[in-house]
């Protein structure tokens, strides 16, 4: 279960959250929990989470190892402050910062090279769904952002399916709609990397996941976890999602 905090929470709020959240997930050793605060709070979040099953992830990275790229953050820098995960090509990055599948691919390669687990985000816009293009868009995104990885690199990634029309809107995809997309993504991965690798690929669902709907989503065979925005900002809500 991954929480994407987007551009919310100062360092004090991050510390308070972890102090409240840790006891709520103290008995969830069988669950993997990832929190993705903003860059400036990663180090303190990693410190506050140390010794628990809460892992920390960045919300973005740049693919170069280092260099004259003002304002950017490398995979090694994320790893050095205690990150184990990183979100790549979230739909807000695609929409507001014009990130492409080609860039997502380079970022995924860089993340893996530094030992981070990338959570590569894909998903169709409302206009694409209405135009009946959902599957062709998902196929293009899977092939473009992870299809070029070596099989052993592909084994290290997680994909998040987040239909843009369901993000922050309160409109969750029904479990059936989400399952259909997840199954399609797994089939596309199978075409690229074979059945075994596709079967072990983890695909998270994201888009208005809440304590009230997480169980029915997680009951679907191809949904392996959730990427949670709004509901991850409240420790009690996110703990309820983790403990679904
Ligand atoms: P939401 O966001 O849960 O607030 O819909 C999900 C996301 O953008 O990752």
Image (cartoon, rainbow, N blue to C red):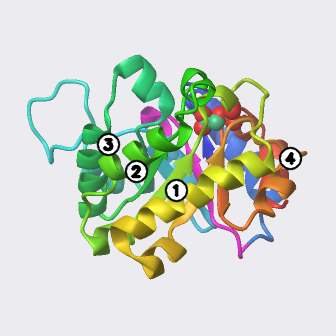
Distance, label 3 to label 2, CA atoms, is 10 Å
Q: Is residue 186 magenta?
A: no
Residue for badge 4: 213
Comes first in the chain, label 3 or label 1? 3
Quadrant in the picture for residue 126 = top right
Spot occupied by residue 54 in the image (x, y as percentages of width and height): 62, 60
Q: Which residue is situated farthest in the left direction here?
A: 68
Asked if marks 2 and 1 touch (Cβ < 8 Å), the reply is: yes
Question: On the picture, is 196 further left or further right than 97?
Answer: right
Residue for badge 1: 185
Which segment is the magenta one?
A: 29-41
Residue for badge 3: 104
Distance, label 2 to label 4, CA atoms, is 26 Å
Question: On the picture, is 170 further left or further right than 52?
Answer: right
Task: Mark 3 vs mark 1: give the one in front.
Answer: 1
Q: Which residue is situated farthest in the right direction here?
A: 212
Residue 142, labelled with which disc? Answer: 2
Distance, label 3 to label 1, CA atoms, is 16 Å
Comes first in the chain, label 2 or label 1? 2
Q: Which quadrant holds the C terminus?
A: bottom right
Q: How packed is label 3: few (under 14 Cα within 10 Å), some, or many (20 or more)?
A: many
Compared to residue 163, the image places residue 92 above or below, namely: above
Distance, label 2 to label 1, CA atoms, is 7 Å
Distance, label 4 to label 1, CA atoms, is 22 Å
Compared to residue 98, the image places residue 157 above or below, namely: below
Question: On the picture, is 54 further left or further right than 23?
Answer: left
Comes first in the chain, label 2 or label 4? 2
């Amino acid at each position: 279960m991954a929480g994407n905090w987007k551009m919310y929470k100062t360092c004090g709020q991050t510390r308070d959250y972890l102090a409240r959240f840790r006891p709520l997930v103290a008995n969830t050793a069988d669950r993997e929990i990832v929190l993705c605060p903003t860059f400036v709070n990663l180090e303190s979040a990693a410190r506050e989470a140390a010794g628990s099953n809460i892992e920390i992830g960045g919300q973005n990275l740049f693919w170069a190892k280092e260099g004259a790229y003002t304002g950017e953050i490398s995979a090694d820098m994320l790893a050095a402050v205690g990150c184990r995960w990183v979100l790549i090509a979230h739909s807000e990055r695609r929409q507001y910062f014009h990130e492409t599948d080609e860039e997502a691919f380079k970022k995924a390669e860089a993340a893996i090279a530094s030992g981070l687990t990338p959570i590569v985000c894909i998903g169709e816009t409302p206009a694409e769904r209405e135009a009946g293009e959902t599957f062709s868009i998902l196929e293009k995104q899977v092939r473009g952002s992870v299809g070029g990885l070596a099989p052993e690199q592909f084994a290290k990634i997680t994909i998040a399916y987040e239909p843009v029309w369901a993000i922050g809107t309160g409109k969750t995809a029904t479990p059936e709609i989400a399952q259909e997309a997840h199954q399609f993504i797994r089939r596309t991965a199978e075409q690229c990397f074979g059945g075994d690798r596709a079967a072990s690929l983890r695909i998270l669902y994201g888009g208005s996941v809440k304590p009230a709907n997480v169980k029915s989503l997680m009951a679907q065979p191809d949904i392996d976890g959730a990427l949670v925005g709004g509901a991850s900002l409240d420790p009690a809500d996110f703990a309820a999602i983790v403990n679904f």
